[in-house]
Image (cartoon, helix red, strand yellow):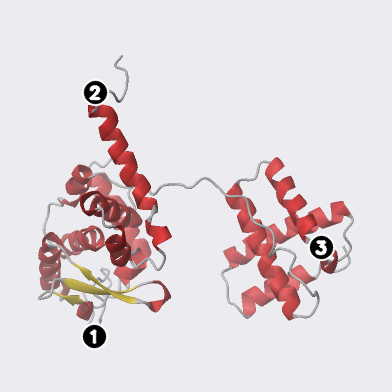
Amino acid sequence: MNDSGWIDRFIRHLEIERRLSPLTCKHYRRDLQALLAFCERSGIDGWGDLDDGHIRVFSAESFRKGLSARSIQRRLSAARTFFRYLMREKHVSKNPITSVSAPKGKKRLPGNLDADRMARLLEIQGDGAIVDRDRAILELLYSSGLRLSELTDLDCGDVDMHDRTVRVTGKGNKDRIVPVGSHALQALARWQASRAAMADAGETALFVSNRGTRISTRSVQARVSHWARRQGIDTNVYPHLFRHSFATHLLESSHDLRGVQELLGHSNIATTQVYTHLDFQHLAQIYDQTHPRARKKD
């Protein structure tokens, strides 16, 4: 292909102007190299000669080679961004990817812990500042359905113990006020009493590491895994699992999809609707177990 050097220029643009991570740039390069190899096999001389028909063939060929729908979606997304760059640089006049839809993958339902296992996980025993902090983190994750980054970004002033709420800055720098349950409030009060012994002077973060500074997301992930093992939870537990469990348990009890959407901070209710599938699975399981006509007995 005559103008294959544009991939290198595009990757430099991602690295220098957009400051994307080396891993992200590596993924872009790999996906675009796959498209370049397709063009060379197909006798396409330049990026401007590529049309939507070629892209559909490229997508179908990728599928026949065993790529998942998610991988093909990523390839097309990389190509779409690449062609936007080429149009900006006046190298091509059109983006052939815009009219091509990626194959739809199977929608994976988010995992969650049932109420009994969640209660067992939260029954942390022990004393000391680290235990107080971890107990408050786990209780708040489940009580308010926070994203991991939302939790680590909290400052002390974001929690209103009197109003029983926490002010959260979510995606797109959108603020929302979320209720805090009684167990989480008790855990937070205990942690606030212990926090002074750990936090550096002037540190505003609500949760701090043993170095006295704001705790990292990686540290929270490690502590969640630690307590899941200690409490005998026989499944992979990670911070976002608390958010899924929060949403699922709330929806099962309230059946108020719009309310759950507000609490989670979803801008689109379609994002929240995935939890209705989880709710239906729960109801279907109860039906199968209890209804006289549900299933034939062995």
**Quarter location, residue 27:** bottom right
Q: Nearer the viewer, residue 142 or 48?
A: 48
Residue type at tag 2: Pro
Direction front: furthest residue: 293
Q: Residue at x 42, y 59 (%)?
A: 270
Q: Nearer the viewer, residue 115 or 194?
A: 115
Q: Residue at x 26, y 57 (%)?
A: 256
Q: Where is 99 relative to 103, above or below? A: below
Earlier in the chain: of badge 1 and badge 3, it is 3
Q: Where is 85 relative to 59, above or below? A: below
Earlier in the chain: of badge 3 and badge 2, it is 3
Mark 3 lies on residue: 50
* C-alpha distance separating marks 3 and 2: 61 Å
Q: Residue at x 37, y 58 (%)?
A: 272
Direction bottom: furthest residue: 202
What is the secondary structure assignment of the residue under circle 2?
loop
Say which mark, if any, is on residue 292: 2
**Quarter location, residue 87:** bottom right
Earlier in the chain: of badge 2 and badge 1, it is 1
Residue 21, horizontal then vertical, whole percent: 56, 69
